[in-house]
Image (cartoon, rainbow, N blue to C red):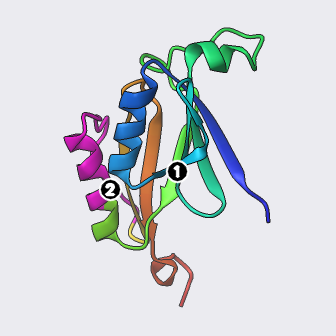
Amino acid sequence: MKQVFINLAVKDVQKSMDFYTSLGFTNNPQFSDEQGKCMVWSDSIFVMLLSHEKFNGFIKKPLADTKNNIAALFALSAESLDKVNEIVDNGLKAGGSEPTPMTDYGFMQLRRIEDFDGHTWEIFFMDMTKMPGQE
């Protein structure tokens, strides 16, 4: 099975773990310690929340300032628009921010949420039966 691991540098590992838990991720303690937490979205998608110190051990370039610059956009699908709203609303209650209003493309609706370090996630629902040209 192929898997995706997204490694994010975070200032406060525990606070970030609590935030990602509010979005619906679960922690895998087998791959977690004080300097990093493995957060599970699905059987094949994982987010590693790593302290700056631990993250710097894997790289040679300086860390991006994700509070003020976008380094990447991460997108996660949800099974319904209601689920999109639930995920983002829970993230807002946990202290995240929503940098832009919902975008509605007709066949796809998405909302964005930023964590405490400025990492931006797009949570979306896509209904392929409404895709232009799909009849």
Residue 17 image position (x, y, % from top left): 42, 37
Q: Residue at x 41, y 32 (%)?
A: 16
Q: Is residue 2 above or below residue 118?
A: below
Q: Nearer the viewer, mark 2 or mark 1?
A: 2
Q: Residue at x 43, y 16 (%)?
A: 68
Image coords of residue 114 (percent x, y) = 38, 35
- Which image quadrant for residue 78? bottom left
**SS class of the residue under badge 1?**
strand
Is residue 19 rendered to the left or right of residue 63?
left
Q: Return the residue at label 1.
A: 75
Q: Which residues are magenta?
A: 85-105
Viewed as shown, does residue 72 lie left or right of 95? right
Question: For residue 33, which quarter of the picture?
Answer: top right
Q: Residue furthest left?
A: 93
> How far across and how far down the image is residue 106, in percent?
38, 69
Q: Who is closer to the viewer here, 77 or 131?
A: 77
Camera-nearest residue between 104 and 9: 9
| Residue position for label 2 | 87
Instruction: Give, as a three-letter code, the residue at label 2.
Output: Ile
Image location (x, y in percent) of residue 41: 52, 56
Which comes sooner in the sequence, label 2 or label 1?
Answer: 1
Q: Is residue 49 left or right of residue 60?
A: left
Residue at position x 68%, y 45% in the image: 5
- Residue 56 visible to an observer of this rendering: yes
